Image: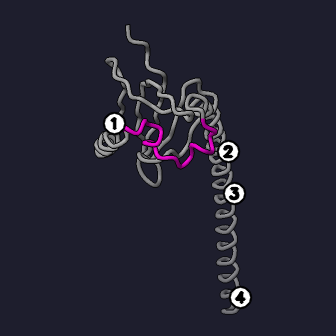
């Protein structure tokens, strides 16, 4: 029969072995979790890059707005309105309208932001935009809201209005 010292030492060794096995298990779990996180981040980065490329190469003018200001604009938008993209970023949406339509549009915009929903301009409705050189552009605009950290964002798809017969 082992003496008390030997028994205590065996118990201590068994506890240390248990701790060592637990630490090995935790390390393996952490390595697996880190690998999964790295893979997920890699996929998310590829998706974000793809989404950005689609936004950039889209043939129709696109704006992302917070409901008042332009957060992002694609090259087709810059071309349609005659601005460079950096000049559009931060610009008020109403600044792209002729002066006579800005106050009425502000009321429409506030109403829309109170109840944002997908809205396509159909039925021959048009809105007038103002090109950088001042000439008026008859436009059709589709609105699509989404939620992003920081609040509601709106994607505006803008295209020249069809000619009326």
Task: Tell which circle, 3 or 1, labels the residue nearer the N-terminal end.
Answer: 3
**Would residue 48 be counted in the magenta stretch?**
no
- The reply, left or right, for residue 141 in relation to residue 34 is left
Q: Residues within 10 Å of mark 2 (few under 14, many from 20)?
A: few
Task: Please give the name of the residue rendered at 44% of the width and 20% of the height, measured from the top-left corner.
Answer: 161
Q: What kind of element bears circle 1?
A: loop
Q: CA distance from mark 2 to mark 4?
A: 53 Å
Q: Is residue 100 magenta?
A: yes
Task: Indicate the position of residue 30 as horizontal and vertical percent values.
Answer: 65, 60
3 vs 1, front mark:
1
For the N terminus, the quadrant is bottom right
Residue 120 is situated, as x and y percent measured from the top left of the image, at 37, 26
Disc 3 crowd, CA 10 A, few/some/many (<14, 14-19, 20+): few
Residue extending furthest toward the top: 165
Q: CA distance from mark 3 to mark 4?
A: 37 Å
Q: What residue sits right under mark 3 in the picture?
A: 31
**Numbered tag placed on residue 42 in the rendering:** 2
- 96 to the left or right of 11: left
* Residue shown at 47% from the left, 26% from the top: 137
User: Which numbered tag is attached to residue 6?
Assistant: 4
Q: CA distance from mark 3 to mark 1?
A: 43 Å
Residue 158 percent across, percent down from the top left: 48, 28
Helix, strand or loop at mark 2: helix
Using the numbered discs, state the Cα–Cα distance from disc 3 to disc 2 in whole angstroms: 16 Å
Element marked by disc 4: helix
Highlighted range, magenta: 83-101
Q: Nearer the viewer, residue 148 or 35?
A: 148
In the figure, residue 42 lies in which quadrant? top right
Specify the farthest residue to the bottom: 4
Residue highlighted by disc 1 = 117
Label 4 – label 1 distance at C-alpha:
76 Å
Crowd rating for badge 4 (residues with CA inside 10 Å; few <14, some 14–19, many 20+): few
């Amino acid at each position: 029969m082992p003496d008390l010292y030997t028994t205590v030492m065996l118990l201590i060794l068994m506890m240390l072995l248990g701790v060592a096995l637990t630490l090995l298990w935790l390390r393996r779990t952490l390595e697996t979790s880190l690998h999964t996180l790295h893979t997920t981040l890699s996929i998310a980065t590829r998706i974000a890059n793809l989404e950005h490329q689609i936004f950039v190469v889209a043939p129709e003018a696109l704006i992302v707005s917070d409901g008042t200001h332009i957060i992002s604009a694609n090259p087709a938008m810059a071309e349609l309105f005659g601005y460079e993209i950096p000049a559009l970023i931060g610009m008020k949406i109403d600044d792209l309208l002729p002066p006579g339509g800005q106050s009425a549009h502000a009321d429409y915009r506030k109403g829309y932001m109170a109840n944002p929903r997908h809205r396509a301009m159909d039925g021959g409705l048009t809105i007038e935009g103002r090109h950088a050189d001042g000439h008026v552009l008859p436009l059709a605009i589709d609105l699509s809201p989404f939620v992003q950290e920081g609040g509601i964002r709106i994607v505006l798809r803008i295209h020249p209005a069809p000619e009326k017969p």
